[in-house]
Amino acid sequence: MAGTVKDLMGEGRVLRWGLSEMGPNTLRRAPEILPLSAVQSGYSMLWRGQEADILPITWRGRGANGRAPSRRRSRRPGSWRRGLTSCPSPGTTQPPHLSDTISAARVAFTESGLVELTAALDAIEVRGNRAPPVLAAWSDVAAPDAI
């Protein structure tokens, strides 16, 4: 898929590309063919499975994952960071939910508060599946090796 998108970019038909709910091996392999513009993956306080594999891979990439690049470096003429637009992508269709999500950026935790919150979340026994079976079947799937 990355090769096809790369060809389409060369033709001027695609400007940016990203992956959604991909497996870690796909996330590692795709940028070897074509750098990603965005990565979308479900994440919540009660299901933090992405912390083990997906988030570390994104940090090894461009240091994206919702953090803005260093202002000092991104303002330099010729810096590739000038065009970097990585940011969280809230999945909602409801304006009030989007407003709630945006307001969460103003929340700041102390180190001890974050430790306390993490301990409280870890103590919750989550029951059931993260997603309905049909969605779960398409989540974290690794792309096949090139033929």
Image (cartoon, helix red, strand yellow):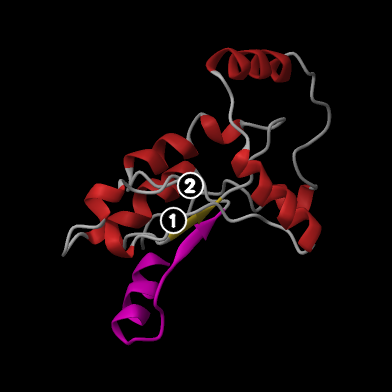
At a point 20% along the width and 59% down the height, the residue shown is 79
Position in image of residue 125 (x %, y %): 80, 19
Q: Amino acid at mark 1?
A: Ser
Q: Residue furthest right?
A: 127
At label 1, counting other C-alpha atoms closer than 10 Å, the crowd grade (few under 14, some 14-19, many 20 or more) is some
At a point 72% along the width and 56% down the height, the residue shown is 98
Q: How far apart are the two marked residues, 2 and 1, measured between alpha carbons? A: 6 Å
At a point 66% along the width and 42% down the height, the residue shown is 104
Magenta segment, which residues? 1-20
Position in image of residue 17 (x %, y %): 44, 67
At a point 61% along the width and 40% down the height, the residue shown is 106
At mark 2, the secondary structure is: loop
Position in image of residue 66 (x %, y %): 48, 47
> Which residue is under mark 2?
66
Task: Tell me which label, 2 or 1, sits earlier in the chain.
Answer: 2
Q: In front: 83, or 128? A: 83
The quadrant of the image that shows the C terminus is bottom left
The quadrant of the image that shows the N terminus is bottom left
Residue 63 included in the magenta stretch of the image: no
What is the number of the mark on residue 86? Answer: 1
Q: Is residue 39 left or right of residue 72?
A: right
Q: How many marks?
A: 2
At label 2, counting other C-alpha atoms closer than 10 Å, the crowd grade (few under 14, some 14-19, many 20 or more) is few
Q: Are marks 2 and 1 in contact (CB under 8 Å)?
A: yes
At mark 1, the secondary structure is: loop
